[in-house]
Image (cartoon, rainbow, N blue to C red):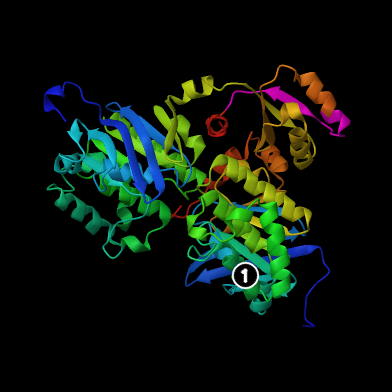
Amino acid sequence: MNDIIEHNSNKVIIAENLTKKFGHFTAVDHISFEVERGEIFGFLGANGAGKTTAMRMLSGLSIPTGGKGIVAGYDIGTQTELVKKNIGYMSQKFSLYDDLKVLENIELFGGIYGMKDKEIKEKTDKLMQVLDFESERNKLVGSLPLGFKQKLAFSVSIFHNPQVVFLDEPTGGVDPITRRQFWELIYDATSRGITVFVTTHYMDEAEYCNRVSIMVDGKIEALDSPRNLKNQFKANSMDEVFQQLARKATRIDS
Amino acid sequence: MDKGNKVLPSAIHCVSVSKSYGETEALKDVTFDVTDGEIFGIIGPDGAGKTTLFRILATLILADSGISAIDGFDVVKDYKEIRKRVGYMPGRFSLYQDLTVEENLKFFATVFNTTIEENYELVKDIYQQIEPFKNRRAGKLSGGMKQKLALSCALIHKPSVLFLDEPTTGVDPVSRKEFWGMLKNLKKQGITILVSTPYMDEAGLCDRIALIQNGQFLKIDSPANIVKQYETKLWAVKSDNMYKLLTDLRANELSKNCFAFGDKHHVSVDNAQLTVDSLNSYLQQKGHTNIEIREIEPTIEDCFMQLSLK
Protein backbone atom coordinates (compact mmCIF):
# COMPACT_ATOMS: atom_id res chain seq x y z
CA MET A 1 0.00 0.00 0.00
CA ASN A 2 1.52 3.27 -1.01
CA ASP A 3 -1.19 5.48 0.30
CA ILE A 4 -0.41 5.00 3.94
CA ILE A 5 -0.88 8.38 5.51
CA GLU A 6 1.61 9.63 8.04
CA HIS A 7 2.81 6.13 8.73
CA ASN A 8 5.76 7.25 10.79
CA SER A 9 3.80 9.83 12.61
CA ASN A 10 3.48 9.56 16.34
CA LYS A 11 -0.22 10.19 16.04
CA VAL A 12 -1.99 6.85 16.05
CA ILE A 13 -5.49 8.32 15.94
CA ILE A 14 -6.44 11.56 14.23
CA ALA A 15 -10.05 12.68 14.13
CA GLU A 16 -11.00 15.88 12.33
CA ASN A 17 -14.59 17.04 12.58
CA LEU A 18 -15.64 13.42 12.59
CA THR A 19 -19.42 13.25 12.23
CA LYS A 20 -22.11 10.60 11.96
CA LYS A 21 -25.71 11.35 11.20
CA PHE A 22 -28.56 8.87 11.21
CA GLY A 23 -31.30 10.67 9.30
CA HIS A 24 -31.86 13.94 11.16
CA PHE A 25 -30.12 12.70 14.29
CA THR A 26 -26.45 13.66 14.70
CA ALA A 27 -25.00 10.91 16.87
CA VAL A 28 -21.43 12.21 16.64
CA ASP A 29 -21.11 15.91 16.02
CA HIS A 30 -17.80 17.21 14.57
CA ILE A 31 -15.38 15.71 17.07
CA SER A 32 -11.65 16.41 16.70
CA PHE A 33 -8.76 14.97 18.67
CA GLU A 34 -5.42 13.20 18.32
CA VAL A 35 -3.99 10.29 20.25
CA GLU A 36 -0.23 9.75 20.55
CA ARG A 37 1.54 6.42 20.22
CA GLY A 38 1.70 4.60 23.58
CA GLU A 39 -0.92 6.82 25.18
CA ILE A 40 -3.83 5.60 27.32
CA PHE A 41 -6.76 7.65 26.10
CA GLY A 42 -9.97 7.54 28.14
CA PHE A 43 -13.17 8.06 26.18
CA LEU A 44 -15.95 8.95 28.60
CA GLY A 45 -19.53 10.05 28.23
CA ALA A 46 -23.04 9.36 29.48
CA ASN A 47 -25.15 6.60 27.92
CA GLY A 48 -26.32 7.87 24.56
CA ALA A 49 -23.61 10.55 24.24
CA GLY A 50 -22.28 8.95 21.06
CA LYS A 51 -19.28 6.98 22.35
CA THR A 52 -20.18 3.67 20.73
CA THR A 53 -20.90 5.30 17.36
CA ALA A 54 -17.56 7.12 17.47
CA MET A 55 -15.73 3.96 18.44
CA ARG A 56 -17.40 2.01 15.61
CA MET A 57 -16.20 4.61 13.12
CA LEU A 58 -12.65 4.59 14.49
CA SER A 59 -12.46 0.82 14.23
CA GLY A 60 -13.63 0.73 10.61
CA LEU A 61 -17.08 -0.70 11.30
CA SER A 62 -19.11 2.36 10.40
CA ILE A 63 -18.39 4.96 7.70
CA PRO A 64 -18.47 8.61 8.83
CA THR A 65 -21.00 10.89 7.16
CA GLY A 66 -18.65 13.84 7.62
CA GLY A 67 -15.13 14.79 8.63
CA LYS A 68 -12.02 12.67 8.49
CA GLY A 69 -10.29 10.06 10.59
CA ILE A 70 -6.90 8.33 10.40
CA VAL A 71 -6.30 5.28 12.58
CA ALA A 72 -2.98 3.41 12.59
CA GLY A 73 -2.09 5.34 9.45
CA TYR A 74 -5.20 4.45 7.43
CA ASP A 75 -8.28 6.36 6.43
CA ILE A 76 -11.39 5.17 8.29
CA GLY A 77 -13.58 6.34 5.41
CA THR A 78 -11.85 4.45 2.61
CA GLN A 79 -9.41 1.89 4.06
CA THR A 80 -11.55 0.12 6.62
CA GLU A 81 -10.00 -3.33 6.05
CA LEU A 82 -6.49 -1.97 6.62
CA VAL A 83 -7.73 -0.17 9.73
CA LYS A 84 -9.18 -3.43 11.08
CA LYS A 85 -5.92 -5.33 10.44
CA ASN A 86 -3.94 -2.86 12.48
CA ILE A 87 -6.14 -2.49 15.51
CA GLY A 88 -7.32 -4.72 18.33
CA TYR A 89 -10.80 -4.65 19.84
CA MET A 90 -12.27 -5.98 23.03
CA SER A 91 -15.60 -5.37 24.72
CA GLN A 92 -17.21 -6.57 27.89
CA LYS A 93 -20.10 -8.07 25.99
CA PHE A 94 -18.25 -10.15 23.44
CA SER A 95 -14.69 -11.21 23.92
CA LEU A 96 -13.94 -14.90 23.36
CA TYR A 97 -15.77 -18.04 22.30
CA ASP A 98 -16.99 -19.82 25.43
CA ASP A 99 -17.18 -23.21 23.73
CA LEU A 100 -13.61 -23.15 22.47
CA LYS A 101 -10.59 -23.95 24.61
CA VAL A 102 -8.18 -21.21 25.71
CA LEU A 103 -5.65 -22.40 23.15
CA GLU A 104 -8.22 -22.68 20.37
CA ASN A 105 -9.39 -19.11 20.94
CA ILE A 106 -5.83 -17.84 20.64
CA GLU A 107 -5.20 -19.90 17.48
CA LEU A 108 -8.46 -18.68 15.95
CA PHE A 109 -7.79 -14.99 16.54
CA GLY A 110 -4.09 -15.28 15.64
CA GLY A 111 -5.08 -17.04 12.42
CA ILE A 112 -7.70 -14.43 11.54
CA TYR A 113 -5.03 -11.75 11.82
CA GLY A 114 -2.74 -13.75 9.53
CA MET A 115 -0.12 -14.81 12.07
CA LYS A 116 2.09 -17.81 11.25
CA ASP A 117 1.55 -21.05 13.23
CA LYS A 118 5.07 -20.92 14.62
CA GLU A 119 4.65 -17.37 15.83
CA ILE A 120 1.27 -18.22 17.39
CA LYS A 121 2.79 -21.15 19.23
CA GLU A 122 5.77 -19.22 20.58
CA LYS A 123 3.67 -16.28 21.68
CA THR A 124 1.07 -18.56 23.26
CA ASP A 125 3.67 -20.28 25.41
CA LYS A 126 4.93 -16.92 26.59
CA LEU A 127 1.44 -15.61 27.26
CA MET A 128 0.43 -18.65 29.31
CA GLN A 129 3.52 -18.06 31.42
CA VAL A 130 2.90 -14.34 31.91
CA LEU A 131 -0.73 -14.92 32.88
CA ASP A 132 0.27 -17.89 35.04
CA PHE A 133 -2.18 -20.02 33.13
CA GLU A 134 -0.26 -23.13 32.04
CA SER A 135 -2.76 -25.53 33.60
CA GLU A 136 -5.77 -23.83 32.01
CA ARG A 137 -4.68 -23.84 28.38
CA ASN A 138 -6.88 -26.79 27.46
CA LYS A 139 -9.94 -25.66 29.40
CA LEU A 140 -13.05 -24.29 27.76
CA VAL A 141 -13.16 -20.50 28.05
CA GLY A 142 -16.76 -20.75 29.29
CA SER A 143 -15.56 -22.54 32.41
CA LEU A 144 -13.18 -19.75 33.47
CA PRO A 145 -14.04 -17.07 36.04
CA LEU A 146 -15.06 -13.74 34.46
CA GLY A 147 -11.99 -11.89 35.69
CA PHE A 148 -9.68 -14.31 33.99
CA LYS A 149 -11.69 -14.32 30.81
CA GLN A 150 -11.33 -10.54 30.61
CA LYS A 151 -7.56 -10.68 31.13
CA LEU A 152 -7.29 -13.37 28.48
CA ALA A 153 -9.56 -11.44 26.10
CA PHE A 154 -7.35 -8.39 26.44
CA SER A 155 -4.21 -10.43 25.81
CA VAL A 156 -5.83 -11.96 22.72
CA SER A 157 -6.91 -8.53 21.45
CA ILE A 158 -3.26 -7.40 21.38
CA PHE A 159 -1.84 -10.80 20.36
CA HIS A 160 -1.22 -9.69 16.76
CA ASN A 161 0.62 -6.63 18.05
CA PRO A 162 -1.79 -3.97 16.78
CA GLN A 163 -0.82 -0.30 16.85
CA VAL A 164 -3.89 0.56 18.86
CA VAL A 165 -6.42 -1.40 20.87
CA PHE A 166 -10.01 -0.28 21.49
CA LEU A 167 -11.45 -1.39 24.82
CA ASP A 168 -15.19 -0.94 25.33
CA GLU A 169 -15.98 -1.10 29.05
CA PRO A 170 -13.46 -3.89 29.56
CA THR A 171 -13.83 -4.13 33.33
CA GLY A 172 -17.60 -3.97 33.86
CA GLY A 173 -18.68 -6.33 36.64
CA VAL A 174 -15.14 -7.55 37.33
CA ASP A 175 -14.05 -7.88 40.97
CA PRO A 176 -11.91 -5.04 42.38
CA ILE A 177 -8.65 -6.95 42.52
CA THR A 178 -8.90 -8.36 38.99
CA ARG A 179 -9.97 -4.91 37.76
CA ARG A 180 -6.65 -3.54 38.98
CA GLN A 181 -4.66 -6.44 37.55
CA PHE A 182 -6.37 -5.70 34.26
CA TRP A 183 -5.10 -2.13 34.34
CA GLU A 184 -1.61 -3.40 35.05
CA LEU A 185 -1.84 -5.39 31.79
CA ILE A 186 -2.88 -2.17 30.04
CA TYR A 187 0.16 -0.33 31.42
CA ASP A 188 2.38 -3.17 30.31
CA ALA A 189 0.96 -3.03 26.77
CA THR A 190 1.55 0.72 26.53
CA SER A 191 5.13 0.28 27.70
CA ARG A 192 5.56 -1.83 24.54
CA GLY A 193 4.24 1.00 22.39
CA ILE A 194 0.63 -0.12 21.99
CA THR A 195 -1.87 2.71 22.17
CA VAL A 196 -4.96 2.16 24.32
CA PHE A 197 -8.34 3.75 23.65
CA VAL A 198 -10.71 2.86 26.47
CA THR A 199 -14.25 3.56 27.66
CA THR A 200 -15.32 2.96 31.25
CA HIS A 201 -18.04 3.79 33.74
CA TYR A 202 -15.61 3.48 36.66
CA MET A 203 -14.42 7.00 37.35
CA ASP A 204 -11.38 5.85 39.31
CA GLU A 205 -10.20 4.23 36.07
CA ALA A 206 -10.41 7.60 34.31
CA GLU A 207 -7.56 8.63 36.60
CA TYR A 208 -5.32 5.92 35.14
CA CYS A 209 -5.51 7.47 31.66
CA ASN A 210 -2.91 9.90 30.32
CA ARG A 211 -5.71 11.99 28.84
CA VAL A 212 -9.46 11.83 29.03
CA SER A 213 -12.16 13.15 26.75
CA ILE A 214 -15.75 13.57 27.89
CA MET A 215 -18.55 13.46 25.32
CA VAL A 216 -21.87 15.20 25.88
CA ASP A 217 -24.63 15.04 23.28
CA GLY A 218 -22.32 13.98 20.44
CA LYS A 219 -19.63 16.61 21.09
CA ILE A 220 -16.37 16.46 23.00
CA GLU A 221 -16.92 18.90 25.87
CA ALA A 222 -13.60 18.43 27.63
CA LEU A 223 -10.25 16.88 26.80
CA ASP A 224 -7.15 16.98 28.96
CA SER A 225 -5.14 15.06 31.53
CA PRO A 226 -7.14 14.06 34.63
CA ARG A 227 -5.06 16.47 36.69
CA ASN A 228 -5.77 19.44 34.43
CA LEU A 229 -9.47 18.57 34.16
CA LYS A 230 -9.79 18.47 37.93
CA ASN A 231 -8.10 21.88 38.15
CA GLN A 232 -10.22 23.31 35.38
CA PHE A 233 -13.49 22.16 36.98
CA LYS A 234 -12.30 22.77 40.55
CA ALA A 235 -13.13 19.15 41.34
CA ASN A 236 -11.56 16.64 43.71
CA SER A 237 -12.15 13.62 41.51
CA MET A 238 -12.92 12.67 37.93
CA ASP A 239 -16.37 11.65 39.13
CA GLU A 240 -17.09 15.28 40.04
CA VAL A 241 -15.78 16.46 36.66
CA PHE A 242 -18.01 13.93 34.92
CA GLN A 243 -21.07 14.85 36.96
CA GLN A 244 -20.61 18.56 36.20
CA LEU A 245 -20.30 17.96 32.46
CA ALA A 246 -22.77 15.17 31.87
CA ARG A 247 -25.56 16.94 33.72
CA LYS A 248 -25.51 19.50 30.93
CA ALA A 249 -26.76 16.86 28.50
CA THR A 250 -30.08 17.70 26.89
CA ARG A 251 -30.58 14.53 24.87
CA ILE A 252 -33.52 12.69 26.31
CA ASP A 253 -31.93 9.28 26.28
CA SER A 254 -29.20 9.75 28.83
CA MET B 1 -42.93 -21.96 57.90
CA ASP B 2 -44.98 -21.68 61.06
CA LYS B 3 -47.50 -18.90 60.48
CA GLY B 4 -48.17 -18.72 64.21
CA ASN B 5 -44.68 -17.36 64.44
CA LYS B 6 -45.67 -14.40 62.31
CA VAL B 7 -45.40 -11.75 65.02
CA LEU B 8 -42.94 -9.57 63.16
CA PRO B 9 -41.42 -11.59 60.36
CA SER B 10 -38.43 -10.15 58.55
CA ALA B 11 -39.17 -8.87 55.08
CA ILE B 12 -36.54 -11.32 53.87
CA HIS B 13 -35.29 -14.24 55.92
CA CYS B 14 -32.63 -16.68 54.70
CA VAL B 15 -30.96 -19.47 56.63
CA SER B 16 -28.13 -21.61 55.23
CA VAL B 17 -29.19 -21.33 51.62
CA SER B 18 -27.02 -23.31 49.18
CA LYS B 19 -27.32 -23.96 45.48
CA SER B 20 -25.04 -25.78 43.03
CA TYR B 21 -25.09 -26.10 39.26
CA GLY B 22 -23.28 -29.34 38.57
CA GLU B 23 -19.95 -28.96 40.27
CA THR B 24 -20.18 -25.19 40.57
CA GLU B 25 -21.29 -24.04 44.00
CA ALA B 26 -23.20 -20.86 43.18
CA LEU B 27 -24.32 -20.16 46.76
CA LYS B 28 -22.74 -21.57 49.89
CA ASP B 29 -24.57 -21.42 53.18
CA VAL B 30 -25.99 -17.92 52.84
CA THR B 31 -27.76 -16.57 55.92
CA PHE B 32 -29.21 -13.08 56.35
CA ASP B 33 -32.27 -11.08 57.33
CA VAL B 34 -33.65 -7.88 55.87
CA THR B 35 -35.98 -5.81 58.03
CA ASP B 36 -39.06 -4.00 56.79
CA GLY B 37 -38.33 -0.82 54.86
CA GLU B 38 -34.61 -1.42 54.58
CA ILE B 39 -32.45 -0.88 51.47
CA PHE B 40 -30.21 -3.92 51.57
CA GLY B 41 -27.36 -4.16 49.04
CA ILE B 42 -25.73 -7.33 47.73
CA ILE B 43 -22.34 -6.09 46.60
CA GLY B 44 -19.99 -8.22 44.54
CA PRO B 45 -18.58 -9.00 41.10
CA ASP B 46 -20.22 -10.92 38.27
CA GLY B 47 -20.39 -14.62 38.97
CA ALA B 48 -20.47 -14.16 42.75
CA GLY B 49 -23.97 -15.69 43.08
CA LYS B 50 -26.14 -12.55 43.21
CA THR B 51 -28.57 -13.58 40.48
CA THR B 52 -28.94 -17.11 41.86
CA LEU B 53 -29.95 -15.62 45.21
CA PHE B 54 -32.54 -13.36 43.56
CA ARG B 55 -34.01 -16.26 41.59
CA ILE B 56 -34.41 -18.35 44.72
CA LEU B 57 -36.07 -15.48 46.62
CA ALA B 58 -38.35 -14.68 43.68
CA THR B 59 -39.46 -18.35 43.69
CA LEU B 60 -38.10 -18.97 40.20
CA ILE B 61 -35.64 -21.72 41.13
CA LEU B 62 -35.30 -23.99 44.15
CA ALA B 63 -32.37 -23.94 46.54
CA ASP B 64 -30.64 -27.28 47.20
CA SER B 65 -30.89 -26.67 50.93
CA GLY B 66 -31.74 -23.98 53.46
CA ILE B 67 -34.83 -21.93 54.27
CA SER B 68 -35.97 -18.67 52.67
CA ALA B 69 -39.05 -16.64 53.45
CA ILE B 70 -40.47 -13.33 52.29
CA ASP B 71 -42.78 -11.49 54.72
CA GLY B 72 -42.99 -14.77 56.63
CA PHE B 73 -44.04 -16.83 53.60
CA ASP B 74 -41.92 -19.78 52.60
CA VAL B 75 -40.46 -19.60 49.08
CA VAL B 76 -41.33 -23.23 48.35
CA LYS B 77 -44.68 -23.78 50.04
CA ASP B 78 -46.16 -20.29 49.73
CA TYR B 79 -44.68 -19.29 46.38
CA LYS B 80 -48.03 -18.03 45.07
CA GLU B 81 -48.40 -15.63 47.97
CA ILE B 82 -44.84 -14.39 47.48
CA ARG B 83 -45.33 -13.70 43.79
CA LYS B 84 -48.21 -11.37 44.70
CA ARG B 85 -46.11 -9.31 47.04
CA VAL B 86 -42.71 -9.02 45.38
CA GLY B 87 -41.63 -6.90 42.46
CA TYR B 88 -38.69 -8.28 40.50
CA MET B 89 -36.47 -6.43 38.06
CA PRO B 90 -34.08 -8.98 36.55
CA GLY B 91 -30.59 -8.04 35.38
CA ARG B 92 -31.45 -8.51 31.75
CA PHE B 93 -34.11 -6.32 30.20
CA SER B 94 -37.11 -8.64 30.19
CA LEU B 95 -40.03 -6.56 29.07
CA TYR B 96 -41.87 -7.08 25.81
CA GLN B 97 -39.77 -5.27 23.19
CA ASP B 98 -42.62 -5.14 20.67
CA LEU B 99 -45.16 -3.69 23.07
CA THR B 100 -45.17 0.05 23.70
CA VAL B 101 -44.16 1.63 26.99
CA GLU B 102 -47.78 2.01 28.05
CA GLU B 103 -48.79 -1.48 26.87
CA ASN B 104 -46.02 -3.04 28.94
CA LEU B 105 -47.09 -1.21 32.06
CA LYS B 106 -50.75 -2.03 31.45
CA PHE B 107 -49.88 -5.68 30.89
CA PHE B 108 -48.06 -6.00 34.20
CA ALA B 109 -50.85 -4.18 36.03
CA THR B 110 -53.46 -6.53 34.51
CA VAL B 111 -51.50 -9.68 35.33
CA PHE B 112 -51.56 -8.59 38.96
CA ASN B 113 -55.29 -7.72 38.87
CA THR B 114 -54.80 -4.02 39.19
CA THR B 115 -54.73 -0.93 36.98
CA ILE B 116 -52.20 1.79 36.26
CA GLU B 117 -54.61 4.34 37.75
CA GLU B 118 -54.93 2.48 41.04
CA ASN B 119 -51.23 2.57 41.82
CA TYR B 120 -50.20 5.55 39.74
CA GLU B 121 -49.02 7.48 42.82
CA LEU B 122 -46.34 4.89 43.48
CA VAL B 123 -44.77 4.93 40.02
CA LYS B 124 -45.58 8.56 39.20
CA ASP B 125 -42.14 10.07 39.79
CA ILE B 126 -40.44 7.43 37.68
CA TYR B 127 -43.08 6.85 35.02
CA GLN B 128 -43.60 10.55 34.32
CA GLN B 129 -40.06 10.73 32.98
CA ILE B 130 -40.89 8.25 30.22
CA GLU B 131 -44.57 9.07 29.77
CA PRO B 132 -43.85 11.42 26.83
CA PHE B 133 -42.72 8.27 24.98
CA LYS B 134 -45.58 6.04 26.08
CA ASN B 135 -46.39 5.08 22.48
CA ARG B 136 -42.84 4.04 21.67
CA ARG B 137 -42.01 0.33 21.55
CA ALA B 138 -39.94 -0.79 24.53
CA GLY B 139 -37.27 -2.22 22.23
CA LYS B 140 -36.65 1.26 20.82
CA LEU B 141 -35.93 2.89 24.18
CA SER B 142 -32.47 3.94 25.34
CA GLY B 143 -30.84 2.11 28.24
CA GLY B 144 -31.84 4.71 30.81
CA MET B 145 -35.46 4.73 29.72
CA LYS B 146 -35.68 0.92 29.63
CA GLN B 147 -34.46 0.91 33.20
CA LYS B 148 -37.17 3.35 34.28
CA LEU B 149 -39.86 1.36 32.50
CA ALA B 150 -38.67 -1.91 34.04
CA LEU B 151 -38.77 -0.33 37.49
CA SER B 152 -42.27 1.03 36.86
CA CYS B 153 -43.46 -2.44 35.77
CA ALA B 154 -41.92 -4.04 38.86
CA LEU B 155 -43.76 -1.54 41.06
CA ILE B 156 -47.18 -1.28 39.44
CA HIS B 157 -48.80 -3.94 41.68
CA LYS B 158 -47.56 -2.18 44.82
CA PRO B 159 -45.19 -4.87 46.08
CA SER B 160 -44.02 -4.88 49.68
CA VAL B 161 -40.58 -6.15 48.68
CA LEU B 162 -38.65 -5.10 45.60
CA PHE B 163 -35.85 -7.20 44.09
CA LEU B 164 -33.48 -5.29 41.82
CA ASP B 165 -30.77 -7.39 40.21
CA GLU B 166 -27.95 -5.10 39.03
CA PRO B 167 -30.20 -2.23 37.97
CA THR B 168 -27.24 0.09 37.35
CA THR B 169 -24.81 -2.18 35.51
CA GLY B 170 -23.49 -0.49 32.37
CA VAL B 171 -25.25 2.73 33.34
CA ASP B 172 -23.23 5.95 33.39
CA PRO B 173 -22.40 7.64 36.72
CA VAL B 174 -24.97 10.42 36.32
CA SER B 175 -27.88 8.08 35.59
CA ARG B 176 -26.72 5.81 38.41
CA LYS B 177 -26.98 8.65 40.94
CA GLU B 178 -30.43 9.46 39.59
CA PHE B 179 -31.54 5.84 39.96
CA TRP B 180 -30.44 5.69 43.58
CA GLY B 181 -32.41 8.86 44.19
CA MET B 182 -35.52 7.02 42.98
CA LEU B 183 -34.80 4.14 45.37
CA LYS B 184 -34.56 6.55 48.31
CA ASN B 185 -38.04 7.84 47.46
CA LEU B 186 -39.43 4.31 47.29
CA LYS B 187 -37.96 3.56 50.69
CA LYS B 188 -39.93 6.51 52.08
CA GLN B 189 -43.08 4.75 50.91
CA GLY B 190 -42.18 1.77 53.08
CA ILE B 191 -41.03 -0.64 50.37
CA THR B 192 -38.25 -3.03 51.31
CA ILE B 193 -35.54 -3.10 48.66
CA LEU B 194 -32.99 -5.83 47.98
CA VAL B 195 -30.60 -4.51 45.34
CA SER B 196 -27.41 -5.94 43.89
CA THR B 197 -24.55 -4.07 42.25
CA PRO B 198 -20.97 -4.64 41.16
CA TYR B 199 -20.21 -0.92 41.78
CA MET B 200 -18.70 -0.68 45.25
CA ASP B 201 -19.26 3.08 45.40
CA GLU B 202 -23.01 2.44 45.54
CA ALA B 203 -22.68 0.51 48.80
CA GLY B 204 -22.82 3.71 50.84
CA LEU B 205 -26.36 4.37 49.62
CA CYS B 206 -27.70 1.20 51.30
CA ASP B 207 -28.79 0.86 54.95
CA ARG B 208 -26.94 -2.42 55.20
CA ILE B 209 -24.92 -4.47 52.74
CA ALA B 210 -23.62 -7.97 52.23
CA LEU B 211 -20.29 -8.33 50.44
CA ILE B 212 -20.44 -11.45 48.31
CA GLN B 213 -17.76 -13.39 46.46
CA ASN B 214 -17.65 -16.96 45.12
CA GLY B 215 -21.11 -17.70 46.49
CA GLN B 216 -20.31 -16.65 50.04
CA PHE B 217 -21.11 -13.60 52.12
CA LEU B 218 -17.82 -12.11 53.29
CA LYS B 219 -19.53 -9.67 55.66
CA ILE B 220 -22.97 -8.26 56.51
CA ASP B 221 -23.27 -4.88 58.21
CA SER B 222 -23.93 -1.19 57.64
CA PRO B 223 -21.41 0.42 55.29
CA ALA B 224 -20.10 2.58 58.15
CA ASN B 225 -19.51 -0.43 60.41
CA ILE B 226 -17.76 -2.36 57.66
CA VAL B 227 -15.40 0.57 57.15
CA LYS B 228 -14.78 0.71 60.93
CA GLN B 229 -13.82 -2.97 60.93
CA TYR B 230 -11.03 -2.49 58.38
CA GLU B 231 -8.20 -4.28 60.09
CA THR B 232 -5.19 -2.12 59.34
CA LYS B 233 -4.28 1.47 58.75
CA LEU B 234 -4.58 2.68 55.20
CA TRP B 235 -2.34 5.20 53.46
CA ALA B 236 -2.87 6.99 50.19
CA VAL B 237 0.43 7.47 48.37
CA LYS B 238 1.17 9.68 45.39
CA SER B 239 4.22 10.74 43.38
CA ASP B 240 5.01 12.06 39.91
CA ASN B 241 5.43 8.59 38.38
CA MET B 242 2.45 6.51 39.48
CA TYR B 243 3.25 3.30 37.58
CA LYS B 244 6.82 3.15 38.89
CA LEU B 245 5.44 4.01 42.33
CA LEU B 246 3.20 0.93 42.27
CA THR B 247 6.11 -1.34 41.32
CA ASP B 248 8.39 0.21 43.95
CA LEU B 249 5.77 -0.04 46.72
CA ARG B 250 5.16 -3.70 45.87
CA ALA B 251 8.91 -4.39 45.85
CA ASN B 252 9.12 -3.22 49.47
CA GLU B 253 8.23 -6.04 51.85
CA LEU B 254 6.54 -3.59 54.25
CA SER B 255 4.30 -1.89 51.71
CA LYS B 256 3.56 -4.74 49.35
CA ASN B 257 -0.21 -4.75 50.04
CA CYS B 258 -0.80 -2.02 47.57
CA PHE B 259 -3.41 -1.26 44.91
CA ALA B 260 -4.02 1.58 42.47
CA PHE B 261 -6.99 3.74 43.51
CA GLY B 262 -7.75 6.50 41.05
CA ASP B 263 -5.01 9.12 41.25
CA LYS B 264 -3.47 7.54 44.37
CA HIS B 265 -2.23 4.15 45.49
CA HIS B 266 -3.64 2.63 48.67
CA VAL B 267 -1.20 0.82 50.94
CA SER B 268 -2.59 -1.22 53.81
CA VAL B 269 -0.18 -0.89 56.70
CA ASP B 270 -0.08 -4.02 58.83
CA ASN B 271 3.41 -3.64 60.21
CA ALA B 272 4.44 -1.12 62.85
CA GLN B 273 7.90 -0.91 61.32
CA LEU B 274 6.48 1.01 58.40
CA THR B 275 6.26 4.71 59.18
CA VAL B 276 5.43 7.65 56.98
CA ASP B 277 9.03 8.86 57.30
CA SER B 278 10.61 5.51 56.47
CA LEU B 279 8.37 5.02 53.44
CA ASN B 280 9.08 8.56 52.33
CA SER B 281 12.85 8.08 52.42
CA TYR B 282 12.55 4.67 50.70
CA LEU B 283 10.63 6.28 47.86
CA GLN B 284 13.08 9.19 47.66
CA GLN B 285 15.91 6.70 47.29
CA LYS B 286 14.00 5.16 44.38
CA GLY B 287 14.03 8.57 42.73
CA HIS B 288 10.42 9.63 43.31
CA THR B 289 9.51 13.29 43.37
CA ASN B 290 6.54 15.13 44.90
CA ILE B 291 5.83 12.24 47.23
CA GLU B 292 2.63 12.52 49.25
CA ILE B 293 1.65 10.02 51.98
CA ARG B 294 -1.57 10.46 53.93
CA GLU B 295 -3.56 8.26 56.28
CA ILE B 296 -7.11 7.87 54.96
CA GLU B 297 -10.40 6.20 55.81
CA PRO B 298 -10.93 3.04 53.74
CA THR B 299 -13.71 2.80 51.18
CA ILE B 300 -16.01 -0.22 50.85
CA GLU B 301 -13.84 -1.31 47.94
CA ASP B 302 -10.74 -1.36 50.19
CA CYS B 303 -12.72 -3.46 52.69
CA PHE B 304 -13.92 -5.84 49.98
CA MET B 305 -10.36 -6.37 48.78
CA GLN B 306 -9.02 -6.96 52.27
CA LEU B 307 -11.78 -9.49 53.01
CA SER B 308 -11.49 -11.28 49.68
CA LEU B 309 -7.72 -11.72 50.08
CA LYS B 310 -8.16 -13.62 53.34
Q: Nearer the viewer, residue A170 or B160?
A: A170
The quadrant in which residue A239 appears is top right
- Side of B107 relative to B287 (left or right): left
Q: Which residue is mark 1?
A: A107
Residue B36 visible? The answer is yes
The residue drawn where x is 83% and y is 27% is B282
Look at the image and give the residue range highlighted in magenta: B283-298
Position of residue A186 relative to residue B251, above or below, is below
- Side of B54 relative to B46 (left or right): left
Q: Nearer the viewer, residue A25 or B61?
A: B61
The residue drawn where x is 59% and y is 51% is A44
- Side of A123 relative to B23 (left or right): right
- Side of A142 relative to B270 (left or right): left
Instruction: Indicate whether residue B198 is drawn in magenta.
Output: no
Q: Chain of mark 1?
A: A
User: Which amino acid does the dot numbered 1 rest on?
Assistant: Glu
Residue B295: % across, % down:
67, 21
Position of residue A137 relative to residue B122, above or below, is below
Q: Nearer the viewer, residue A64 or B248?
A: B248
Residue A52: % across, % down:
54, 61
Residue A77 visible? The answer is no
Q: Nearer the viewer, residue A137 or B35?
A: A137
Position of residue A153 relative to residue B182, above or below, is below
Most distant residue in the bottom direction: A2
Residue B250: % across, % down:
74, 35
